[in-house]
Image: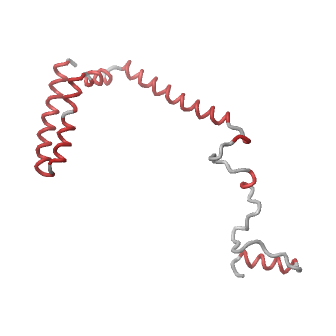
Amino acid sequence: MSDAAIFAISLGVTLAGLVASWGVYRRRGAASGARGAALSLIPLAAAMTGVTKFFTDLVFSPVKWAGVAVAGLAVVLYLASGAALSRRSVTEGERPEGSRKAPKERRTGAGKAPKGAVGGPAPTAGDPDLAEIEDILRNRGIK
């Protein structure tokens, strides 16, 4: 596209946006109208600075799209290699404090009450059968 065509399209979009901003100003107030005017001036500014030419060349050029794809692949490979290196460098004994894995003694469940237990562990009384019955009753929430 030629520079004149890009400028003419940008100027038209800007003028249409300014007209719409005037209507918004009348309906919703000065703040909304000013915001619409600011957004309407962006296409004209882009055409005047050459940004629009860059993007039109980007959109219509398969070589530039291939370059964008290669750059995206480079970012994905870099992030994947960083994740792989961080997993490899951290060993079980060197885990940082905020890591997801819990220490081994917490994962085993040692010292925890059974699933349905209401109180603590059953008292060890003289009669082991009575202690077992009390434990069963506690687990069921009866005693």
Q: Residue at x 11, y 46 (%)?
A: 23
Residue 103 in picture, x, y percent from top left: 71, 50
**26 in relation to 5, above or below:** below
Q: Residue at x 31, y 22 (%)?
A: 60
Image side of residue 56 versus residue 119, left or right: left
Q: In which quarter of the image is the N terminus?
A: top left
Total marks shown come to 0
The quarter of the picture where residue 68 lies is top left
Residue that protrudes farthest toward the right in the picture = 126
Q: Quadrant of the C terminus?
A: bottom right
The quarter of the picture where residue 122 lies is bottom right
Image side of residue 88 versus residue 134, left or right: left
Image side of residue 86 versus residue 132, left or right: left
Residue 104 in picture, x, y percent from top left: 74, 51
**36 in relation to 121, above or below:** above
The quarter of the picture where residue 142 lies is bottom right
Residue 79 in picture, x, y percent from top left: 54, 32
Along the line of sight, the residue nearer the viewer: 35 or 69: 35
